[in-house]
Image: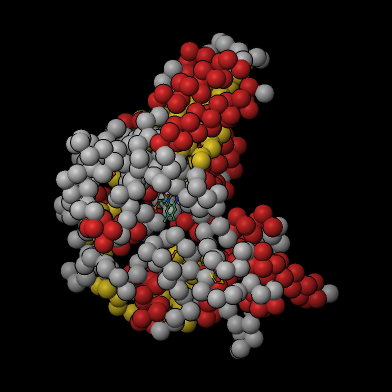
Amino acid sequence: MSDDAKQSAVRCTLNGRPRRDFVPDNMLLVDFLRETVGLTGTKIGCDGGECGCCTVLIDGEPRHACLTLAAVCDGAEIETIESLDTGGRLAAIQRGFNEKLGAQCGFCTPGMVMAAEGLLRENPNPTDDDIRAGLAANICRCTGYVKILEAVHFAADELAGRDKEAAA
Amino acid sequence: MEYMPDFKLHRPDNIEDAVKLRAEEPDALFVAGGTDMIVNVRRGIEQPKHLIDITAIEELKSILRDGDGLHIGAGVSLKELQSNADVLRDYPAVGEAARAVAGPTHQEYGTVGGNLCLDTRCLFYNQSEWWRQSNDYCLKERGDTCHVAPGGKRCFAAFSGDMAPSMLVYGAEIDVAGPNGRRRMPLTDLYRNDGMAHLTLEAGDMLTAVHLPKALAGSPSRYEKARVRGSIDFPLAGAAVRLEMDGKTVKDFVVALTAVNPYPQIAKGTDAYVGRELTDEALDEIRELVRKQAKPMRTTTVAPWYRRRVVGALARRRTEEFAG
Ligand SMILES: Cc1cc2nc3c(=O)[nH]c(=O)nc-3n(C[C@H](O)[C@H](O)[C@H](O)COP(=O)(O)OP(=O)(O)OC[C@H]3O[C@@H](n4cnc5c(N)ncnc54)[C@H](O)[C@@H]3O)c2cc1C
Ligand code: SF4
Ligand code: FES
Ligand code: FES
C-alpha cells in the first residue's frame, strides 16, 4: 500500500515511450497529459464523461481521460492523438478525417479519431451502424456526423487495401 | 483545471484490505470505473478524503459458470458482460441492458458493481458546484429543502442504473464483503425506497459478485429503456421482462423497473397472469399494473407523467413480443 503522501508513483507507456512519474492522487489523466506532459491534443469539452473529447486509448481501448485518475494508469499503455502518425505521415484514420472533411472546428476530432481508431482495431470492417454505435459516446457540434462516417469508412477501406497488397 | 478535492488514493489488491480501509476511514469511498464517482467528485457532490480504487483486485474481475449458475464479479466491465456467450445465451436481458448503459466508451471500463451501486439521480443534484450553490443545494446534499417536493423531508432522486432490472427478473443474488465477513443476499435487499440512502450497504461493505441462478438459465427476457438521446443517456424509465409461455398461456412472468422510483423494483402482481392467455385486455392490464407502481417525480427534464406512461408501454411491448 502507498505511504501517507497524497501522490503516487506511475510507470506507464505513453505513446510508445516508457515513463516514470509522481502524480498527485487527485490529478485527472487529462490534466496530466495536457499540463504535466504538454500533450494538448487531448481536449476537455465537458465536466465529466458527456462529450468524448478527451478519449484516449488505454491498453488499446477507448477511455475518457477526464474520468480517469492519472495514478490509476500505473502499468498502463496510454495512446493519445499525438501517437498516430509515423514520422509525419498521417495514420489511415487521420487521412480519412482529412480527405472526407470529417473535421470542421476540430475540437471533437482528437477524441473522435481515437474512438474510431479503437473501433477499427476491434472491427476493421465496420458497417454504418457499427460506426454509429462505436462512436456514440463522442459528440460533434459541427459536422452532423455524415462526414465522420465517411472518414471511418475511408480509413477502413484504405487499411483493407493495404492488407491486400501485403498479402499479395 | 477545475475543482478536485484533495484526497488520498488507495489501490488495494485484495477485498479484505479494501473493506478494512473503507471501514476505518469515515470519509473514504470506493471507486471502480469511476464513470459516475469521478463525475460526482469533480462536481463537488462527493468530497472524499480517501478514494479506494478497487480495479486492482483480480478476484472481482471474473465471470464463472458452475452447477449453480453464473457468477459475475463486481469488477467485470459492461463491455465484457455484453460479450460473454453464457450471458447472451442464458440471460439475454442482462447483455441487452449492458449495451444500453451510457455510451460504448463508458461500457469499456464502467463496471457491474458500479452500475448496481450507482447513486440516485436528480435534476437538482447532478449539477456543477456553482449550479447547486446558486440553488442553496438541496436536501440530498448540504441543503435543507427538496426542490422537487419542497414541503417534505424525503428525497425522490431516481435510481437510474440499467443493469438492476435485468438481473432482478432472474432473482439474482449478490455477495457482500464487510468488516464482519462475507454474506449472500437477494439483489432486491440491496435497495430501499429512499433517494438519500437507497443502498442498504453499511460503511465498509463492498459488493463483490452477482449470481444468476442456473434454474432460470435460458428463460427468455428483454430489457428496454426510454432516453432523451438514443446514443447516450441515463434511462428516463426502463423495464425488464422475463416471460415463459406454455403454449398459449403464461408459465412464468416477472417485470422489473428502473428510473421511475428511488430504487429498482420487481413489479408486484404479475403472478396473477400465470395460467392466463395474453389477450389484448390482459396486456392493457399489465401496462396499467406497471404504471401504477411507477412514481417518478420531477427529477429529470422530462415530465413525470411521460415517464409513467412510457414505462407501462415498454413493459407491455416487451411482454407482447414474447406472447407472439
Ligand atoms: C454521460 C454518462 C451517461 C451515463 N449513462 C448511463 C446510463 O444510461 N445507464 C446507467 O446505468 N449508467 C449510466 N452512466 C453511469 C455509469 O457510467 C454506469 O452506471 C457505470 O456502470 C458505473 O460503473 P463504474 O464502475 O464506473 O462506477 P463508479 O463510478 O466507479 O462507482 C459508482 C458508485 O458505485 C460505488 N461502487 C462501485 N463499485 C462498488 C462495489 N463493488 N461495491 C460497493 N460500491 C461500489 C461507488 O462507490 C460509487 O458510489 C452514465 C455516465 C455518464 C458519465
Ligand atoms: S429529489 Fe429533492 S432532495 Fe432529492 S436530489 Fe432532488 S431536489 Fe434534492
Ligand atoms: S471532456 Fe467530455 S467526456 Fe471527457
Ligand atoms: S468538428 Fe466541431 S465539434 Fe466536431
Q: Residue B265 placed where, x, y %? A: 39, 30
B211 vs A126, left or right, is left
- Which residue is at a point 36% across and 75% down the rendered structure image? A31
B265 vs B100, left or right, is left
Q: Nearer the viewer, residue A115 or B283?
A: B283
Residue A124 image-quadrant placement: bottom right
Q: Residue A25 placed where, x, y %? A: 27, 69
Ligand 3 shown in quarter: bottom left
Q: Residue B62: tell me if it is visible.
A: no
For the C terminus of chain B, which image quadrant?
top right
Q: Residue B142 placed where, x, y %? A: 18, 51
Q: Coloured how?
A: secondary structure
A85 relative to A128, above or below: below
Q: Residue B97: tell me if it is visible.
A: yes
- Which residue is at a point 39% across and 56% down the rendered structure image? B35
Residue closest to the far top: B275
For the N terminus of chain B, which image quadrant?
bottom left
Residue B7 image-quadrant placement: bottom left
A57 vs B114, left or right, is right
- Which residue is at a point 54% across and 37% down the rendered structure image? B224
Q: Residue A89 placed where, x, y %? A: 64, 86
Q: Nearer the viewer, residue A148 or B203?
A: A148
Residue B57 image-quadrant placement: bottom left
B253 relative to B131, above or below: above
Q: How many marks?
A: 0
- Which residue is at a point 60% across and 55% down the rendered structure image? A133
Residue closest to the far bottom: A87
